[in-house]
Amino acid sequence: MGARTRVAVALALAVGLLGGCGGTPVTGRPRGVGDIDAGTAAGIPVNNNGPSGPRRGAPDATLPVENADGGTMDKLAVNALSDIYDYWSERMPADFDGQQFAPIKRLASYDSKGAAIKLCGQSTADLVNAFYCNADDSVAWDRGVLLPMLNKQFGPMSVVAVLAHEMGHAVQFRLGAKSNITQNTPTIIKEQQADCYAGGFFRWVAEGKAKHFDINTGTGLNHVLATMFFIRDPAGLSASKQGAHGLAFDRVFAFQAGFSEGPTRCARMNQDEINSRVAEKERTEAEMETSHNGDVQFDSKKVQDLLKTSLDEALSQTNNQKPPTISYTGATCPQGKSTPPVSFCQADNTIAIDAKTMEKIATPPKKGQEPGVDGAGIGDFAAFAEIASRYSLAIQKSVGAPLDGDKTGLRTACLTGAWAKFTDLSGNATESKLRLAVGDLDEAVAELLQDTSLIAADVNGKQVPSGFARVESFRIGFYEGDKGCATQFS
């Protein structure tokens, strides 16, 4: 990661510079174009009350599909593919020198628990998947297990997202060199591009251009982004490994890049560009052991002390201000507004925490559970980031920055991201430090997309309306630290 510079300084400067900067766009690491707006998703206003899902009254599309049963899942898939065809018939010639889009030669449906068929040289028995096969130019999906599971957990637009991703693979092979693709291209490049191409399609849907689907840019788009958490790689799998698809933090970035900037942005993704930003690096056994190979026990006194030390070090050079105290005896402030399960109590400079509720958030979901849904937890970093966000409000107060409003919520998410980078760079494999563990950034994504998350909320608990903007702000802090936070959120 280069020199182990202290992000403590970066985190302090991020707020110290807030008073005097203008609205200059952030330069550096690529992301969505334009200023981040708390009320929009890359410029499209957030409307949680807008329709999201299959468009009412739209007639079902007809496409030739092998082995289809004509049921609900197949109709959903065909309608999705029909709209994706329309999208690429428009965008491919417009964005890639007039090249025309050729429909897929073979579409196939199957039930992974039913009678097996052969697709792409393999049996579909127990093949819970959706995929594009370049060998015969086919797109296939499991209507029996995968599509119903996605539909149940995230809604029908998650099914559309998965098929848009698979169609992204078909597009990149059609484009070839125009999309930096050959038969020998590493998997991670193909997967990041496919996520990105899916994001471009969803912007088209959000703009109301699709015949069969609508998506609102609030909860609807949030659920699509959450799908990336569900289909991410296992924590610890390096992006450099053959077959790697990317962690949720990286997959969401790719989707957002496509949504913000369109297909030409996706085609520019290559190994150098991805290496410059993919966060999850392969770690040594010693580093994995030090990071506890995942989640730690939230209610451990040692862990809580390490968290306090980490936050205090990040604040250590902010105008010599006294760091706030942290209390785990409840989230109620004696004076002023409380925002349970974590509150920044301004009157006594205290971070007040409801330990039991936070411990639930810190508990990883069980197999088959969706993070943060129906009482399921998310993981330790989700809880730590909630606390860090309230801690960052103390930093902001110490330099006279406003503590209410959407700009504060974005700045808070950004500073929390900068603190996350501090934990990544802090110490070495032999020191007892709170360090970013594999999979922690995915937990941040999952928590940021929760309707009750405080990571991108002001001192009164008012959350930034756009989940898209919340994630993007956190990412700026993680990658760009003081410059990103200060320039973007002055």
Image (cartoon, rainbow, N blue to C red):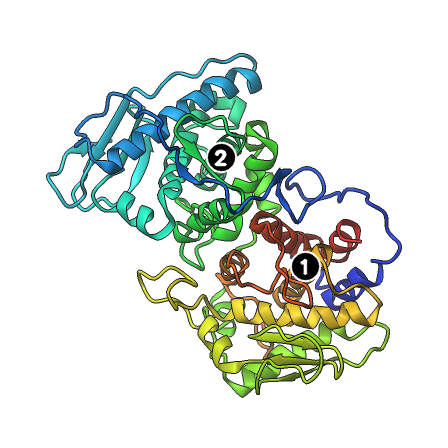
Residue found at x 68% / y 45%:
37
What amino acid does circle 1 point to? Gly
Within 10 Å of the Cα at label 2, are there few (<14), some (14-19), or many (20+) other Cα atoms? Answer: many
Q: How many marks?
A: 2
Residue found at x 42% / y 47%:
244
Decide if residue 432 is on the left or right side of residue 357. right
Residue found at x 47% / y 53%:
238
Residue 422 visible in the displayed image: yes
Considering the numbered disc 1 on the image, is that residue within a helix, a strand or a loop? helix
Q: Kindly give the residue lying farthest to the right in the view shown.
A: 20
Image coords of residue 344 (percent x, y): 68, 75
The picture quadrant where one finds residue 354 is bottom right
Image coords of residue 5 (percent x, y): 74, 63
Considering the numbered disc 2 on the image, is that residue within a helix, a strand or a loop? helix
Image coords of residue 183 (percent x, y): 41, 29
Residue found at x 58% / y 44%:
46
Distance CA(mark 2)–CA(mark 1): 26 Å
The picture quadrant where one finds residue 130 is top left
Q: Earlier in the sequence, mark 2 or mark 1?
A: 2
Within 10 Å of the Cα at label 1, are there few (<14), some (14-19), or many (20+) other Cα atoms? Answer: many
Q: Which mark is residue 409?
A: 1
Badges 2 and 1: C-beta atoms under 8 Å apart? no
Query: If the image is split into quadrants, where does the N terminus sit?
Result: bottom right
Q: Nearer the viewer, residue 171 or 188?
A: 171
Q: Nearer the viewer, residue 417 or 438?
A: 417
What amino acid does circle 2 point to? Phe
Image coords of residue 338 (percent x, y): 64, 75
Q: Nearer the viewer, residue 132 or 375?
A: 375
Q: Kindly give the residue lying farthest to the left in the view shown.
A: 115
Q: Which mark is residue 202?
A: 2
